[in-house]
Image (cartoon, rainbow, N blue to C red):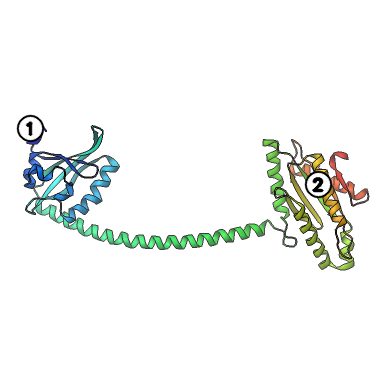
Amino acid sequence: MDIQLDQAPCGYFSISDSGIVRSVNQTLLDMLKLERSELLGRHIESTMSVTNKLFFHTYFYPYIQLYGHVDEMYFSFRTSDQQDVPVLLNGVRQTRDGESVVDCVVVVMRKRIEHEKDILQTKTKLQELYQATQEANKELERLHEEYEVKQQALLKVNDQLEAMASTDPLTGLKNRRFFQNSLLASLILLEQQQRHFSLLVIDIDHFKSINDTYGHPIGDLVLGNLAGLLQSMSRSSDVVARYGGEEFVIILAECDHDQAMEVAERYRFEVASSDWGQYNITVSIGVATAVQGDTDTSVFQRADQALYASKTAGRNRVTHADHL
């Protein structure tokens, strides 16, 4: 250290990021009544009281790390004979020889009494702040735990509501609203990614006679049993829904014309050959394979027209819209 800095009319010291003193001028040593060997290599906090250590930790370190400098910080060091030395502290953080260091300059304060009052007030405020922070943290933790519990409960309720909103209560299948949203999503995938799909519209043949002969409770039982059969035969990628009354719809993902006809025929055959007890249940099916430019209305109308053709041709059969 050159003599000008060593004998400067203000104290100077340089510390590492961890607070170890790297260099110090004679002015500061005289101020603290220390020998150079007593301070070099030691932590700068060894020259501070407990109160000022807390102050140093609370203000100096965070500020210097965040902004890279500290300007006009009122502070106190402690001499070797335990006397407080109030100072005005300035510091700047920089890199020297590949190492991050903090260079500081201190000037002895003249208004010692006022400074000591400031220190006392600061200490009191810090203690109050610490206590308030501890209490606030505990309350925050409690509120956070309470929030997590309520959030999980809310998510569960939302899931239940979503399931209720998209489920047909009689059959347990997806409802018409869910089907329509899925149909729109499938059309978007067709347009953007050329992912083809087909639509089946399925209607129970002579269902009105079942209701008229056996009553609506039996009709509801038939609807539920048929829904279970359709769901059990479908893939996880398919959407099986009750459209309304005795009519069901199925969106067959990644199915072209021929594949859709095979699947639809399998549904028809399985329904016709299943044991329904004293009831004879068959279904008529209309099929439409979506093409570029289709809308949800157009593809459904084509499948519905194909269903009508199956009905008028004698029921218990499958018709593709392309054959009309």
Question: What amino acid is labelled 1 in the image?
Answer: Ile
Instruction: Name the secondary structure under disc 2.
Output: helix
Give the residue drawn at x 81%, y 68%.
Answer: 217
Residue 66 in picture, x, y percent from top left: 30, 43
Instruction: Name the secondary structure under disc 1.
Output: helix
Location of residue 70 by image quarter: top left
Give the residue drawn at x 23%, y 32%.
Answer: 97
Give the spatial CA distance, label 2 vs label 1: 96 Å
Report which residue position mark 1 lands on: 3
Location of residue 143 by image quarter: bottom left
Give the residue drawn at x 16%, y 54%.
Answer: 119
Q: Earlier in the sequence, mark 2 or mark 1?
A: 1
Question: What amino acid is labelled 2 in the image?
Answer: Val
Residue 23 in picture, x, y percent from top left: 15, 38
**Visible residue check, residue 242:** no
Q: 10 Å neighbourhood of mark 1: few (<14), some, or many (≥20)?
A: few
Left/right of residue 131 with respect to residue 82 in the rendered view: right
Left/right of residue 160 with respect to residue 299 in the rendered view: left
Residue 37 in picture, x, y percent from top left: 10, 43
Question: Which numbered circle lies on residue 263?
Answer: 2
Front residue of this view, candidates 57 and 266 = 266
Front residue of this view, candidates 86 and 27 = 27
